[in-house]
Image (cartoon, rainbow, N blue to C red):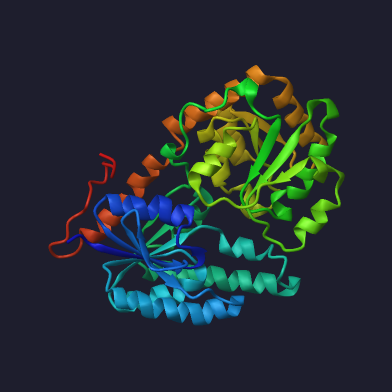
Amino acid sequence: MGLSVCVLSSVHEALDHRMFYKECRSLSRAGYEVTVIAQHPRHETVDGVRIIPLEHPGRRLSRIFHTGWQIYRKALGQKADVYHFHDPELVGVGLLLRAHGKKVIYDVHEDVPQDLLHKFYLPTWVRRPMSWVAGTVEATAARLLSGVVVVTPSIEERFKKRARRVVLVRNFAVPEEFPPVADIPWEQRDPAVIFLGSMSRNRGIRQLVEAIDLVPDALNAKLRLLGPFSMPDLPDELEKLPGWARTENLGVMHERKLIGAELSKIRAGIVTIHPIPQLIVSYPIKVFEYMAAGIPIIASDFPVWREIIDKAQCGILVDPMNPRDIAAAIEFILTHPAEAEAMGRNGRRAMENEFNWIHEERILLGLYNDLCASWPGGRPAVSQSGSARN
């Protein structure tokens, strides 16, 4: 019987892309017995991973306290060898499990102290004290937990002097989710661009709707939105803009193959996030999924993204606050099909060579191997230099 891993989240759904389709499946393929405790409709096993559902939380405070306690009780009952939690509000749960002598990993998706400084629902006066508290709690926990997994180099830098062990596991694309050859030839694709992922004001969704209205009518350009709205009043706000007539809201798609199919129909993917400190240094998964789908990227001109996109020659950088700049990039993509298709091919090549999950999987398994090898009689499921696919 292999070593067991219990993955915990009060925020993410059980089939969250990073948590489940990347990390949990990689661990399962490597020989670990993996259980997920998170929001899900039912008990079931998916791709060899057992899912234990949580009651759907109500308000945020209920999720932090009631759901946290529920997760702790369920987690302790699993008697797993390693616990891997994905939310800052579960730090207390992680420390309690650590007190039971368990190996515990904290997976940090966001720069929480920086993020709190820009939470629209928090009063301005409370943001800085909450940011300080969050940073202090994370720093203290990092010294006590077995390891910390981070998603960006900037977060890695913050934890380097605090954690016992910190590893960078970036949110790169899974190659097999995107076929290497597009089903639809470039010249037959719709004159459309797409925004993939959660939509909010600081992710530039208003500027995109304004930009599509500025593209010349003769091009018949469309903006497609694929993902949830993070703010309930946002759709009403966007519908009042002239560009909404050229906008198609595709809703939410959970099936990865359907997302890949949508990306194969269009001419470019857009990621024009606002220049907010924690977003400037982020690695949005949509950037790497656009690359994997073989479509050019229209992206905010941030140094981290410039290094990736310029190096790969796979897109156009714009001022995310300027709808005219975004519109000019869309117009270029639609009126220069040969150059656009070449950008798409370059992005796909860069993903295959560098920006893919296979490399990140090895780093994740290396952490687990190091932790599990410390048990008497415990042996790594796969060598640090190997891959679960080999």
Image quadrant assignment for residue 311: top right
Q: Is residue 182 left or right of residue 42?
A: right
Question: Can you give x and y, in whole percent of width and height, for residue 386 in the image?
Answer: 26, 41
Depth check, front residue: 96 or 297: 297
Depth check, front residue: 220 or 159: 220
Residue 33 in the image: above or below residue 195: below
Question: Can you give x and y, in whole percent of width and height, for residue 177 in the image?
Answer: 45, 40
The residue depicted at 72 percent of the width and 25 percent of the height is 334
Q: Is residue 301 visible?
A: no
Residue 178 in the image: above or below residue 202: above
The residue depicted at 64 percent of the width and 32 percent of the height is 266
The residue depicted at 72 percent of the width and 65 percent of the height is 120
Question: Can you give x and y, in whole percent of width and height, for residue 384 in the image?
Answer: 26, 46
Marks counted in the figure total 0
Q: Is residue 357 visible?
A: yes
Q: Quadrant of the C terminus?
A: top left
Depth check, front residue: 375 or 224: 224
Residue 132 in the image: above or below residue 338: below
Q: Quadrant of the N terminus?
A: bottom left
Image quadrant assignment for residue 105: bottom left
Question: Which residue is at the far top?
Answer: 338
